[in-house]
Image (cartoon, rainbow, N blue to C red):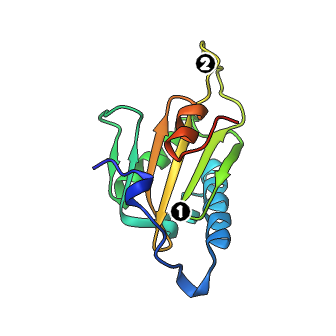
Amino acid sequence: MRLTLATVRSAGYADGMTATEFDHQVEAGIAAWQRGDIAALAPLLADDVELLWWEPTPSDCHGKEAVLALLRERFADGESRSEIEVLHSRGDALVVSRKECSPPRTDGSQPATVVLTQGGQVVSMQQFRTREQALASVGLPAS
């Protein structure tokens, strides 16, 4: 099931944490993954988290263990070793993208991921072909 922002809203955070504090934890978890520390991201993921490409593919993942396995694989393949930029952060949605694509895409676009959270856990990571599409999916204009 592909989630949308309309179907996901924050339902409180563990340990009295604020949405902003949780956003920072997610950002730190993503940065840790970029360094190969997948374990830092694991506690933030819901058991039924999804990681979806911009169109359905065999690489789409459903469930925490499948997502973590794919993230480990991508890191081992060298695909995930670039600095991440947070384009938007609002408690129930983060939009993140690599600062630079390596190698650069022929059309000049940069993929982005919308990270949706609910109840203090990441429930969906939806990838988009472009930053503009990701920002539009959460109701924001392109930056």
**Vertical comparison of 116 with 126: above or below:** below
The answer to whether residue 5 is left or right of residue 141 is left
Badge 2 density bin: few <14, some 14–19, many ≥20, Cα 10 Å: few
Which amino acid is tagged 1?
Answer: Asp
Q: Residue at x 62, y 60 (%)?
A: 90
Q: Which residue lies furthest to the top in this view?
A: 106
Which amino acid is tagged 2?
Answer: Arg
The span from disc 2 to disc 1 (Cα, nearest Å) is 29 Å
Marks 2 and 1, the one that precedes in the sequence: 1
**Vertical comparison of 76 with 130: above or below:** below
**Snapshot quadrant of residue 99:** top right
Q: Which residue was labeled with disc 1?
A: 92
Instruction: Where is residue 65? Give x, y as percent.
Output: 36, 59
Q: Which residue lies furthest to the bottom in this view?
A: 15
Q: Does residue 68 appear in the picture of this structure?
A: no
Instruction: Where is residue 143? Give x, y as percent.
Output: 70, 36
